[in-house]
Amino acid sequence: MSVDYYDVERDLSSEERMTRDTVRKFVTNEFMPVVREHFQAGTFAVALIPRLGELGLLGANLSGSGLPGINNVAYGLVMQELERGDSGLRSFASVQGSLVMHAILAFGSEPQKERWLSLLGAGKAVGCYGLTEADHGSDPEGMKTKAVRDGKGYLLNGSKMWITNGSISDVAVVWAKLDGTIRGFLVEKGTAGFSARDIKSKLSMRASITSELIFEDVRIPGENLLPKAEGLKAPLQCLTQGRYGIAWGALGAAMACFEEALAYTSERKQFGRPIASFQLTQAKLADMLTEITKAQLLCLKLGRLKDAGAMRHTQVSLAKRNNVRIALEIARTARGMLGANGISDEYPVMRHLCNLETVETYEGTYEIHTLILGKDLTGLSALM
Ligand SMILES: Cc1cc2nc3c(=O)[nH]c(=O)nc-3n(C[C@H](O)[C@H](O)[C@H](O)COP(=O)(O)OP(=O)(O)OC[C@H]3O[C@@H](n4cnc5c(N)ncnc54)[C@H](O)[C@@H]3O)c2cc1C
């Protein structure tokens, strides 16, 4: 069993519980035994990609084209359990489903959907999502990557930075300006002029591939333009889906850190007593539990709103902003509670702590979500 102080279990359907338990088993039995070696080596567990597909965990909440179409609470629980393993595992599934498959489903043509969705859902193809550039992160509207018309197709030039799954992808959803308007293009692996270079300097999200994408006079066939995506609102709509999963995922990382801290301090003795018996330790555990419980209730309510078609993107901002920040604080506190062992990769806590630094930054930093909420509350944008 796992931390569930307010009996959220009671509000889950049997399908939702079953989905969560299946993912928990997969992560425990198949992912945890290999996560340390991947984190140390700076590699992703690519051998597990087809397993993620077999289990229906890629684009799990999307419907049509043979996709599982599970509800959004079950999907959130999938994200929670994947990130209980490692943020890199959840990032893989988030990018593949919420960013790439969602973009093709929402903005793609019928032939694009037929070509990619079932392959991506089965884990037989990998996708990445290129929005960020080296000089344009929080402000993607300023992007420099540009497409121009070239006969029946397009010529693409520019680069994207910090792209999850970049070098292992068969297809990249790339956002670029065409006549000054942001449009989405499907850029396939092996296209002349397109290359991906891995970023090796990361101290966070090490068990995940992050790359730079480079486009030098890349010829894109006309049918690879996403026909229904025009303007920044299209990539932002995908990000709302991604951020929804992150809110749940960060909770999974927080739960893993809390459970480790509780178990460790109950066993570890100093001054002749378990360190869990000291009041200062108990105060930390009580604070962690309180934040986790609030985040669990937030996620469940957000998921039910999403299933009812009533979720607003600003509510997703609130949940992403809150849950990642509390997860980061819980990971940091847990790290200290494990003493010197807290910095060892024999325990998962420091790995989660390092990963969560990325999760706080990507898909809208803490500050950007603060400003989204500020605008929603006041009607005044601090971003322009
Ligand atoms: C491991 C990893 C994986 C990633 N994967 C992807 C991916 O798959 N696809 C993709 O497109 N991108 C990806 N990203 C990029 C990520 O989304 C960006 O890093 C993020 O949007 C922040 O942009 P930036 O790094 O350029 O920071 P900046 O935008 O330069 O921000 C730096 C700091 O300034 C603050 N700041 C910026 N503007 C304001 C403001 N108006 N007011 C107050 N503070 C402000 C920010 O909050 C931040 O603290 C990934 C990043 C990482 C680290």
Image (cartoon, rainbow, N blue to C red):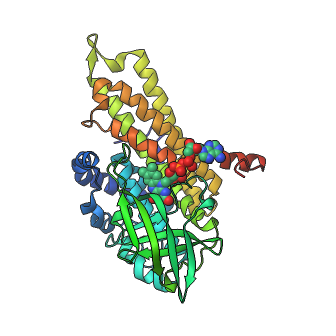
Count of marks overlaid on the render: 0
Question: Left or right: where does residue 131 sit relative to residue 233?
Answer: left
Q: Quadrant of the N terminus?
A: top left
Left or right: 129 as drawn, with respect to 269: right
- The residue that appears at 37% across and 30% down in the rendered structure is 335
Residue sitting at 24 percent across and 36 percent down? 346
The outermost residue toward the bottom is: 152
Does residue 49 appear to the left or right of 135 in the view shown? left
Q: Quadrant of residue 97?
A: bottom left
Q: Is residue 381 above or below residue 164?
A: above
Q: In this rendered view, identify the residue nearer to me: 32 or 154.
A: 154
Out of 61 and 335, give the one closest to the viewer: 335
Taking the view exactly as shown, the residue that stands out farthest to the top is 271
Residue 76 visible in the snapshot: no
Image location of residue 253, percent across then percent down: 40, 43
Looking at the picture, how far across and down is residue 29, in whole percent? 23, 52
Residue lying furthest front: 217
- Return the residue nearer the eye: 215 or 242: 215
At which x and y percent is residue 367?
60, 43
Question: Can residue 260 be seen in this snapshot?
Answer: yes
Residue 384 is situated, as x and y percent measured from the top left of the image, at: 72, 52
Instruction: Judge whether 51 appears above or below 8 on screen.
Output: below
Question: Dividing the picture into quarters, in which one does residue 305 lie?
Answer: bottom right
Q: Is residue 130 above or below residue 338?
A: below
